[in-house]
Image: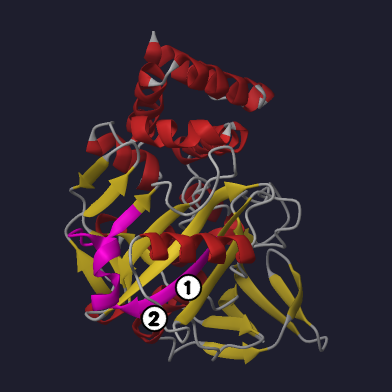
Amino acid sequence: MTADVVVVGLGPAGRALAHRCSVRGLDVVAVDPHPDRRWTPTYAAWSDELPGWLPDAAVGVTVASVGVWTARARTLARAYTVLDTPGLQQALTIDGVRVVAASATRVDRTSVTMSDGRIIKGSNVVDARGLFDASGLAEQTAFGLVVDSAVAEPILDGAAAWFMDWRSDNGAAPDDQPSFLYAVPTSDDRVLLEETCLVGRPALDQRELAARLRNRLAARSVGLTGTEQVERVRFAVEAPKRSRRGGATAFGSRGGMLHPGTGYSVAASLTCAEPLAAAIANGHNLDHTLWPARTKAIAALRAAGLRTLLDLDPTQVVPFFDAFFELPLPQQRAYLSQRTNFAETAAAMGNLFRVLPADLRRAVTGSSLSMGKYSPIRALSTIIE
């Protein structure tokens, strides 16, 4: 079996790429051991991250602004979208794709070997099988409950959603590893309430997160029935090293497109699916399409940001985010979302460094310098000076 492109993995990244390649008339083969498995996680993104080609059926709920609570409450005037997970899966149609229900045991630049020994050859092979085993890597974990909107009213407290609520009513001690509340509507009448450990090595376990969430809800007079839908999250936020030669093109979270400071990757994968499909159709270099120099530089800055978060003392986390959300919204947007705006991303980190308290500036400097020759501290120092 041969094809113009072989996509390995039919999660959001792989399915989006297979869909966009098929729309362009390319001959596509997709390999996945369970191609019809229903997606169940809650996917969300800043609305301005989503590509214009994404059908409305993929959108669940969009709110015009979200709340952030650090040392005080703030409203971020930036629209936020919770995707309709079944709608997203159905919208990424792959009717014109030849789907092979099998596990890939070897994935190379132009061929895929399956567990039964069959080999599929392609002019291009894209590996979109998701994240590697998270063992030993920095992780994000979360425990969430989906409740009726009326039940969530004391939590929302007039806000449409909470992107990060760092208030200390979850029962954790000041020197415990911190976690925050993430609260977003998933439909017109349902809200996800999720206690989240942003990053940790190791991250907080599900039992601790569940206890903290229940403490927080009880403190705000939210009653539970015990029958609520549960959502559990655990994945690595440290990107795997990208192969420089010989291997297939890695895409989505497997290709390092997951933001290490937020854990988001779906919007980036959706956005990059079309230019990657165009590069395949036109015979362009796929690595250069996904990873131009400025995108690699931004990835280095964000890796430094992750290192800083991991190195912070628990008591420094809230002041760090308090300073971050004081930045101008365009700089927040660049750091949180944009893959090609190096100047604004570096400006965000430089301005953040300026306004941080002295102890946090020392932590940021130490984390950056510990990255050796890959440290972005030189780029930041140019801006700061």
Q: Name the residue under label 2.
A: 92
Outermost residue toward the right in this view: 117
Picture coordinates of residue 315, whole percent (x, y): 52, 33
Outermost residue toward the top in this view: 385
Q: Quadrant of the N terminus?
A: bottom right
Quarter of the image where one finds residue 87: bottom left
Q: Of callouts 2 and 1, which one flags the residue occurring earlier in the amino acid sequence?
A: 1
Instruction: Please name the residue shown 50% across and 75% down the image.
Output: 231
Q: In this view, does 238 lie to the left or right of 193?
A: right
Q: Is residue 291 above or below residue 63?
A: above
CB atoms of marks 2 and 1 within 8 Å: yes
Instruction: Please name the residue shown 72% across and 75% down the image.
Output: 112
Q: Distance between the residues labelled 2 and 1?
A: 8 Å
Residue 275 in sight here: no
Relative to the observer, which residue lies in front, 144 or 335?
A: 144
Q: Is residue 301 above or below residue 153?
A: above
Picture coordinates of residue 296, whole percent (x, y): 52, 39
Relative to the observer, which residue lies in front, 62 or 295?
A: 62
Regarding mark 2 in the picture, which secondary structure is present there? loop
Relative to the observer, which residue lies in front, 58 or 136?
A: 136
Q: Is residue 242 above or below residue 267?
A: above
Near mark 1 (Cα within 10 A), the count class, few <14, some 14-19 or many ≥20, is: many
Segment tinted magenta in the rendering: 142-163
Residue 143 badge: none
Q: Mark 1 points at which residue?
A: 12
Near mark 2 (Cα within 10 A), the count class, few <14, some 14-19 or many ≥20, is: many
- Residue type for callout 2: Leu
* Total numbered circles: 2
- Residue type for callout 1: Pro
